[in-house]
Amino acid sequence: MSRYTAECRKQDGFTIVALTDSANESAAELLPEIGNNLYRFTTDGREVIRTSVSMQTLKDETFAASKYGTPILFPPNRIQQGQFEFRGRGYQFPINEPPDYHLHGELIVRAWEVLDYGASDENGAWVTSRLRYADYPDILAYFPHELTFTITYRLVDGKLYMDSVIQNDGADEAPFAYGLHPYFSLPYESDNGIKLQVPARDEWPITNLSFVTGQPSPTETSRQIAQAGIPLGTYPELGCTLLTLDPDAEPVCRIALPQAGYTIAYQLDRQFPYVLLFRPNWDQAFSIEPYTYVTDAFNLPYAHELTGVRGIQAGEQCKLTTVLWVENEG
């Protein structure tokens, strides 16, 4: 019998997809109906992503879908007044964080279609889901580009791979801004030695809402987090830090829990040049959010090469992969 399984089942009135690897005590559970959210991941018996509220709460409570699990963001973070211009075309996103902002896009609340799932000794356990803007006329009304998002989660040897494929099936170039928002479960109260390392190069000056207020530069924080790491036990609740990654460094972020004897490792795609760090005040968790652009980049007066502003051409396909695993001491 294969060590891997993939099953689709009903739980608490919702359809979930569960991937398991018995050899590594690993399990990943997704909610396709609520933003294709990876709401639970354990590996080597370690809890990496945990959702502390019910599925019904994720579906019904305002903003809950962006506060737990692994929300998928397009575009990431906030847009001032929901407005920007790209290639001479104006865009007006809905104000979903009143009174002034659009926050995180709509992938996190829409239902995704499960295309395929399965398991084998050769390929591990996997599930592929899709969301097409062409199926949502209300989105096309303010973002008239037929983008298709296809995501495959694959559990292999205790590692969880997330392959994101974004394709422009429309006739025009579309503004492109993609991000992820995993909430890593951390025992702050029992483990004050938790440290975070990120291969950072520069830090951006930002507000407490992550809006950029100036150009990036090397800082004591960016140097420390890239070298010895920074303590997370004293990181302020609702605090945030925006970093540009070092393109010459290994793109792996690590959260070390020395008292617990393991490290959470998160490998980013090189197409994510930026990470936003964030500590929520509603859960025992910490977010390392990879972005393709900095917050509200389309409205910034800086070179696009600096901020990550870009488009996705008609017929173009963009592929990004992240990998999540645990490193045990010894």
Image: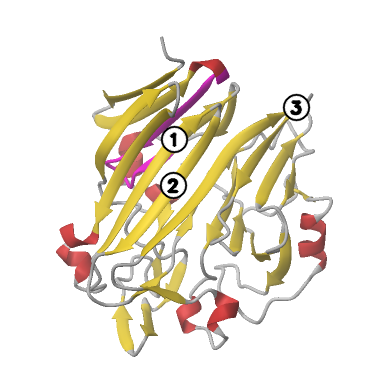
In terms of secondary structure, where does tag 1 sit? strand
Residue 264 on image: x %, y %: 65, 37
Kindly indicate whether the residue at mark 1 contacts the one at mark 3 (C-beta within 8 angstroms): no
| Magenta stretch bounds | 24-38
In terms of secondary structure, where does tag 2 sit? strand
Q: From where the camera sits, is residue 182 visible?
A: no
At 58% from the left and 59% from the top, the residue drawn is 270
In terms of secondary structure, where does tag 3 sit? loop
Frontmost residue, 1 versus 74: 1
Residue 133 on image: x %, y %: 23, 61
Against 122, residue 316 (above or below) is below
Q: CA distance from mark 2 to mark 1?
A: 8 Å
Kindly indicate whether the residue at mark 3 contacts the one at mark 2 (C-beta within 8 angstroms): no
- In the rendered structure, which disc, 2 or 1, sits on the residue that comes first in sequence? 1
Quarter in which the C terminus is drawn: top right
Q: CA distance from mark 3 to mark 1?
A: 25 Å
Image quadrant assignment for residue 119: top left
The residue carrying mark 1 is: 154
Q: Is residue 34 magenta?
A: yes
Mark drawn on residue 261: 3
Left or right? Give the position of 40 relative to 202. left
Against 5, residue 129 (above or below) is below
